[in-house]
């Protein structure tokens, strides 16, 4: 039996965005130079964990007491996440203090319940954190965890991914639910009737709470081809860097990535020349030190990683 290759959605997205980051994080499993703060995931994870209990422990049976029961769970799961993950509230991108985060979680939880009631997201089968394992082809396998899987009384199957961003759909990747839809079809030999995103912060707004679409053969074939291409490249160890400002700003390996640092230096040098051509004051030019390290602007130093 040959080697099996597995991809989750997050693994696929990592490879799609930058094969080198995939190699560092998932093949070599190298620690980044500084631990990556998980503050961006606290709110979404906590709300999702509360509603995992709502569905899987059938807390909805509490009826009039369900809202209070859910709110009681919020601090428990909030502190559990902080205990189990590295969360740096002093990170420059973290805008909230711990108690401010918890307050936002407690504000979101009743909104989500409102959205569930309005959309009637219960039925003969209603569960959270559903694991899908599927064979795509030969030695290629998919792994996914679906936030919510609902089979309504009409027998309509809904596959839902929850999002907690205050920017609503800004950071949503449309391929995510296509990935889950394909995995579901491979396991159950049928597509979900609808797949969609549930925007937790907007759950009490009927117009903004959800984005739905109906899976079809075209979208499924597109994601299938993209996945096969990713698997093939991973199998052939194609892990070249694809640096870009929009992707690299989220990467914990940015400061030790030669390709990204070269891109930054080239951009800075171009900006320096543009300023010089306009007769404006410029930063010091990039130069090589006697040891071969690169000197950047005001004496900053990047070690040569070659």
Image (spheres, grey):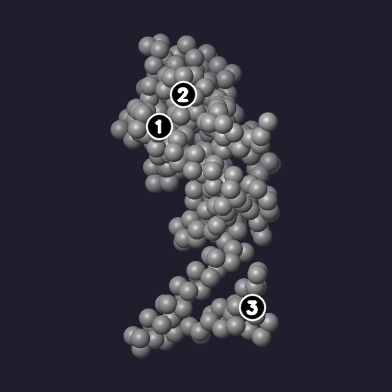
Corner quadrant of residue 142: top right
Q: Check disc 2 and report the residue beneath it.
A: 185
- Asked if marks 1 and 2 touch (Cβ < 8 Å), the reply is yes
Nearer mark to the viewer, of 1 and 3 = 1
If you read the primary sequence from the N terminus, does the residue marked by circle 1 or circle 3 appear first? 1
Nearer mark to the viewer, of 2 and 3 = 2
Determine whether 186 is above or below 273 in the image.
above
- Asked if marks 2 and 3 touch (Cβ < 8 Å), the reply is no
Determine whether 10 is above or below 148 in the image.
below
Residue depicted at 42% across the width and 77% down the height: 270
Residue depicted at 39% across the width and 86% down the height: 276
The disc label shown at residue 201, or none: none
Is any atom of residue 144 visible in this view? no
The disc label shown at residue 220, or none: 1
State the image coordinates of residue 59 (x, y, percent, origin top left): 55, 18
Corner quadrant of residue 255: bottom right
Taking depth in this image into account, of 26 and 46 the one nearest to the observer is: 26
State the image coordinates of residue 165 (x, y, percent, origin top left): 45, 43
If you read the primary sequence from the N terminus, does the residue marked by circle 1 or circle 2 appear first? 2
Where disc 1 sits, the SS reads helix
Q: How would you rate the neighbour count of disc 2 (Cα within 10 Å): few for under 14, some for 14-19, many for 20 or more?
A: some
Where disc 2 sits, the SS reads helix
* Quadrant including the N terminus: top right
Question: How far apart in space, not on screen, are marks 1 and 3 (Cα)?
Answer: 48 Å
Give the total of numbered labels. 3
State the image coordinates of residue 197 (x, y, percent, origin top left): 41, 33
Q: Check disc 3 and report the residue beneath it.
A: 293
Q: How would you rate the neighbour count of disc 1 (Cα within 10 Å): few for under 14, some for 14-19, many for 20 or more?
A: some
- Asked if marks 1 and 3 touch (Cβ < 8 Å), the reply is no
Where disc 3 sits, the SS reads loop
Is any atom of residue 84 visible in this view? yes
């Amino acid at each position: 039996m040959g080697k099996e290759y597995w991809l989750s959605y997050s693994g696929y997205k990592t490879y799609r965005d930058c094969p080198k980051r995939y190699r560092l994080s998932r093949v070599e499993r190298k620690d980044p130079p500084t631990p990556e703060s998980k503050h961006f995931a606290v709110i979404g994870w906590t709300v999702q964990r509360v509603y995992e209990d709502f569905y899987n422990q059938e807390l909805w049976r509490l009826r009039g007491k369900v809202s209070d029961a859910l709110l009681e769970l919020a601090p428990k799961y909030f502190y559990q996440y902080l205990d189990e993950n590295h969360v740096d509230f002093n990170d420059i991108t973290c805008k909230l203090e711990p108690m401010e985060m918890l307050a936002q979680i407690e504000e979101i939880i009743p909104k989500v319940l409102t959205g569930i009631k309005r959309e009637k997201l219960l039925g003969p089968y209603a569960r959270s954190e559903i694991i899908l394992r599927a064979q795509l082809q030969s030695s290629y396998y998919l792994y996914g965890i679906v936030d919510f899987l609902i089979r309504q009384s009409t027998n309509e199957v809904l596959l839902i991914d929850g999002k907690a961003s205050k920017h609503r759909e800004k950071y949503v990747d449309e391929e995510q639910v296509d990935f889950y839809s394909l995995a579901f079809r491979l396991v159950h030999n049928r597509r979900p009737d609808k797949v969609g995103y549930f925007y937790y912060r907007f759950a009490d707004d009927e117009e903004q709470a959800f984005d739905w679409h109906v899976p079809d053969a075209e979208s499924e074939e597109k994601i299938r081809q993209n996945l096969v291409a990713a698997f093939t490249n991973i199998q052939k160890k194609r892990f070249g860097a694809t640096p870009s400002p929009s992707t690299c700003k989220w990467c914990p390996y940015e400061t030790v990535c030669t390709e990204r640092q070269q891109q930054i230096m080239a951009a800075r040098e171009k900006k320096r020349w543009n300023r010089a051509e306009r007769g404006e004051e410029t930063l010091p030019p990039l130069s090589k030190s006697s040891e071969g390290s690169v000197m950047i602007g005001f004496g900053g130093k990047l070690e040569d990683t070659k």
